[in-house]
Amino acid sequence: MHPAYSIIFFTTASGFGYGLAAVLGMGVLDPSLGTTKAAYFFALALISTGLMSSALHLGNPQRAWRAFSQWRSSWLSREGVMAIITFVPLCASAWLSIFEDRHVMWIGLAGAALALVTVYCTSMIYASLKSIQAWHTPLTSVSYILFAIAGGLSLACAFAALEGVLTRYLLLSAMVALAGAWVAKFIWRGRMENERPLSTPESATGLGGIGKVRLLDPPHMTSNYLTSEMGYRVARKHAAKLAAIAMGFGGAIPVGLFGVAMVLPVSATIGNTIVLSALAFHILGVVVERWLFFAEARHAVMNYYGR
Amino acid sequence: MTTIPKPASSKKLGLVIDLDICVGCHACVVNCKEWNTGGYGNALSDQDPYGADVSGAWLNRIHTFEVVPDGAEVIGEEGDARVVHFPKSCLHCEDAPCVTVCPTGASYKRSEDGIVLVDENKCIGCGLCAWSCPYGAREMDVAAGVMKKCTLCIDRVYNETFEEVDRVPACVRTCPAKARHFGDLGDPISDVSKLVADRGGMDLMPEQGTRPVNKYLPPRQRTALASKADGFANENTDGASGFFAWLDGMLEKI
């Protein structure tokens, strides 16, 4: 699948935003602190810019409001509806922290739950597509949700560190979430690489009874919407390297750095640098992971195009 | 509404495509583009139409496949290879995933005849329906920003100002080899249903669970080329009589 930058940005930004909002909703950070107020604002900014980027890649963005209507059948519609509903408790929590220095637990928890449901809806847009076998598994949803939580906890660690209130408890939660997210991703990737293709050129043409089917002449010489949207291919050797980079940057290095920050008695400045660079590595790793999520996924229609 | 509607009748309009007959001339492709660029919805745009990197939205495309019999590494080793021209357009599936994924209600299946259509005034051009279709039946019109697909020429098949013979999809009307048939596949005694029954009409990618209405007729068994070739490569003159026996004898003596 074509890794469109708008969708990569949308899924990563909204994932981090909803993850941070969920962590804040649980009341982990002191609502009266300046960095907590900044974190609330940052979470809402990430979610909003992510949603806007996804709306801008539409062919007719002026009609985007129509996408709220088909929640009975469409995961994309459900995601839109949930995003709007989730804004209510998230904005309320942000208001309470920024202007009233307080956190109301039930509003916070409602926001956290809805944020994760919205991430689930996002993941189901992909996981519900049988035509893209790599995505068509509950593991897709598991990894989207775990990545949101890991990203949210990593961001929360950074905001807490800036105020000097980073606890070992928060660091440990981030490390556990990061490990969980990458274990899920590792299993997801193994499944993608090892599962037998559901559809083949033989089943796509129905000619398997005669023998092995190979494309002799494509329908046209240049690329078309289908080949550019769904025919994206990334060299296998590069994909393996990129996956290792994603896992190292996004998982191993942040876990290691958080561990160092937790164990070593370092000064506040050095501690902050360690935590912030762990976050930076994690973001970089997740962007690479999300790029691969699209670039590596093979669409069933390519059985007709010999790819 | 983008849920699949309960059928209002048993009618399932669709195409039957005969892979034994199609010669791969692309006439149906061209006539489809011609009809649909002036018919239902926005014109089918092309990008850079006279340039080197031309592309555009088409609703019907022909792929040509080579089928090598099982057990063969190279062509001709294990029986004859077949070249099969393969027209591909929307299959108007009974469980159409492109309908249920649509967030706006633009993509819908008609309860009265099963035709899958896009209401271009509601389409936001998100492209998710094209992702959900395993057959590649939907292509974005980049100029209009809306999704295009085969309408089964709904503006022809119900058009009473047309003569009866023209009330079929443009691709069917134009096919010079009669490889394409249009009719009601929900009616077991219709011509198309009989064709499907006689020739073992098949679904494409049944494993995707889409239950296509359109059916494909597999190529017929063919007489092996080698069995015909014997007569041409005959080195044996035994049994020749009359003039040929005399000629054979004379030529032997030279």
Image: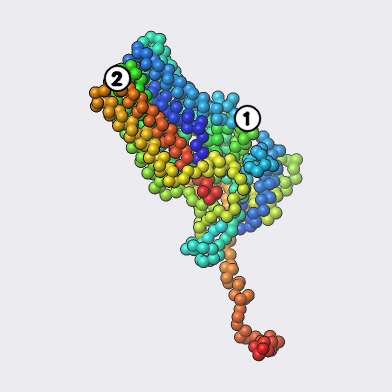
In the rendering, at what x and y percent does residue B127 appear?
55, 35
Q: Is residue A173 left or right of residue B207?
A: left
Q: Residues within 10 Å of mark 1 (few under 14, many from 20)?
A: few
Instruction: Output the chain of dot 2.
Output: A
Name the residue type under label 2. Ala
Residue underneath mark 2:
A268
Q: Residues within 10 Å of mark 2 (few under 14, many from 20)?
A: some
Residue underneath mark 1:
B121
Instruction: Label 1, secondary structure: give it.
Output: loop
Instruction: Output the chain of dot 1.
Output: B
Q: Is residue B40 left or right of residue A126?
A: right
Where, by quadrant of the figure, is residue A254 drawn? top left
Q: Is residue A66 visible?
A: no
Residue positioned 61% across, 40% down in the render: B149
Where, by quadrant of the figure, is residue A147 drawn? top left
Tell me how far mark 1 sits from mark 2, CA to CA.
Answer: 58 Å
Name the residue type under label 1. Asn
